[in-house]
Image (tube, helix red, strand yellow):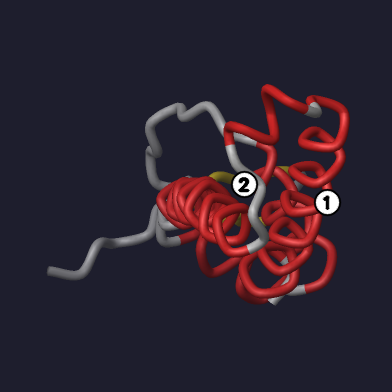
Amino acid sequence: MEQALTYSEVNGYRIPDLTLPDEPEVELGRYALMRRKYLKEHRKGLFSRLLMNGGLNPHLTEIEQTAMERLERQSAQMAKSEGVTESLKSSDPLTWIQRMTNIRNRVEETILRELVYS
């Protein structure tokens, strides 16, 4: 079913009455906000297409969920493979914090490259 366009006259010009589809309000996390900024600044066509068809918020929500799941899963896997254990945490907390921070930073770098800025 094709929807007929309606027009409004403004200063002698006929302007189509266009509206964006309604999207529910969602709270965007860190990775979703970075993705939105990237799309808006560097992938304008994709950003406009997602915005026009109502797919922007679902896309950003999916990016956020995937990024958070990946961050937790890969951090745990790397900590296990590198011997960063609870016993290290209790015996040498500063070393544990240093190594876990290093692991999280490496995982986040991959997430940014593969999910956010691609």
Find disc 1 in the rendering and name its residue: 102
Q: Amino acid at mark 2?
A: Ala
Q: Tell me the number on the disc at residue 84.
A: none
Q: How would you rate the neighbour count of disc 1 (Cα within 10 Å): few for under 14, some for 14-19, many for 20 or more?
A: some
Q: Where on the picture, by quarter, is residue 106?
A: bottom right
**Residue ID at (69%, 77%):** 118
Q: Tell me the number on the disc at residue 32.
A: 2
Q: Position of residue 78 (x, y in %)?
A: 61, 60
Q: Quadrant of the N terminus?
A: bottom left
Q: Position of residue 61 (x, y in %)?
A: 46, 46
**Residue ID at (73%, 56%):** 108
**Residue ID at (38%, 31%):** 24
Q: Where on the picture, by quarter, is residue 94?
A: top right
Q: Amino acid at mark 1?
A: Asn
Horizontally, is 20 left or right of 96 in the view? left
Label 2 residue SS: helix
**Residue 11 appears in the figure:** yes
- Is residue 78 or residue 72 the one in the foreground? 78
Q: Position of residue 13 (x, y in %)?
A: 69, 55
- Which residue, as the protein is rendered here, is positioned at the far left? 1
